[in-house]
């Protein structure tokens, strides 16, 4: 498994782009942790005003609970336990559980 971690604080803006399916889970820490089992690549970097995660295929991303998250996926998105706003743009399914605010779907 390939994994990348970056310390971001308690309420970052996170943009996630995945070629396949992605699972996003809220976590009590202050870091973004991204992982994938595929060989298609994984990148986590700090941009000017947000954190950007790029996953070539399928993956899992843990974000701080109060994060504001935008997710773009070629297949399915599964979001769990995020207390900030979530925007999800999926090619197939969008599953949302225990999310404070769903902005765009």
Image: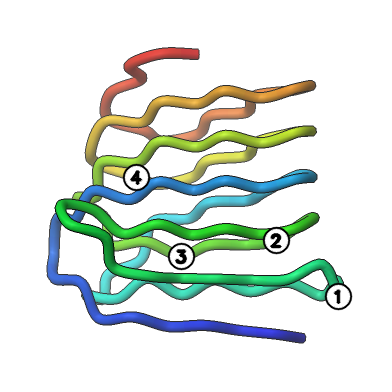
Q: Nearer the viewer, mark 2 or mark 1?
A: 1
Q: Position of residue 16 (x, y in %)?
A: 49, 48
How far, Cα to Cα, is label 2 from label 4?
17 Å
Local packing at callout 4 (Cα closer than 10 Å; few below 14, some 14-19, many 20+) is many
| Residue at 79% in and 45% down | 20
- Find residue 59 and name its label: 2
How far, Cα to Cα, is label 1 from label 4?
28 Å
Q: Quadrant of the N terminus?
A: bottom right
Local packing at callout 2 (Cα closer than 10 Å; few below 14, some 14-19, many 20+) is many
- Find residue 62 and name its label: 3
Q: Which residue is mark 1?
A: 39
Q: Quadrant of residue 35?
A: bottom right
- Find residue 82 and name its label: 4
Q: Is residue 100 left or right of residue 70?
A: left
Pointer 1 or 4: first along the chain: 1
Q: Nearer the viewer, mark 2 or mark 3?
A: 2
Residue contact between numbered discs 4 and 3, judged by CB atoms under 8 Å: no
71 and 94: which one is in front? 71
Pointer 3 or 1: first along the chain: 1
Q: Quadrant of residue 42?
A: bottom right
Q: Position of residue 33 (x, y in %)?
A: 46, 75
Residue 40 against residue 66 in the figure, above or below: below
How far, Cα to Cα, is label 2 from label 1?
11 Å
Residue 42 against residue 2 in the figure, above or below: above
| Residue at 15% in and 52% down | 49
């Amino acid at each position: 498994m390939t994994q990348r971690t970056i310390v971001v604080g308690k309420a970052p803006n996170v943009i996630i782009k995945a070629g396949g399916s992605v699972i996003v889970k809220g976590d009590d820490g202050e870091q973004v942790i991204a992982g994938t089992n595929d060989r298609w690549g994984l990148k986590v970097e700090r941009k000017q005003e947000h954190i950007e995660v790029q996953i070539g295929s399928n993956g899992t991303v843990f974000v701080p609970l109060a994060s504001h998250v935008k997710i773009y996926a070629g297949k399915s998105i599964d979001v769990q336990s995020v207390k900030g706003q979530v925007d999800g743009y999926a090619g197939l399914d969008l599953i949302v559980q225990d999310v404070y605010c769903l902005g765009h779907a």
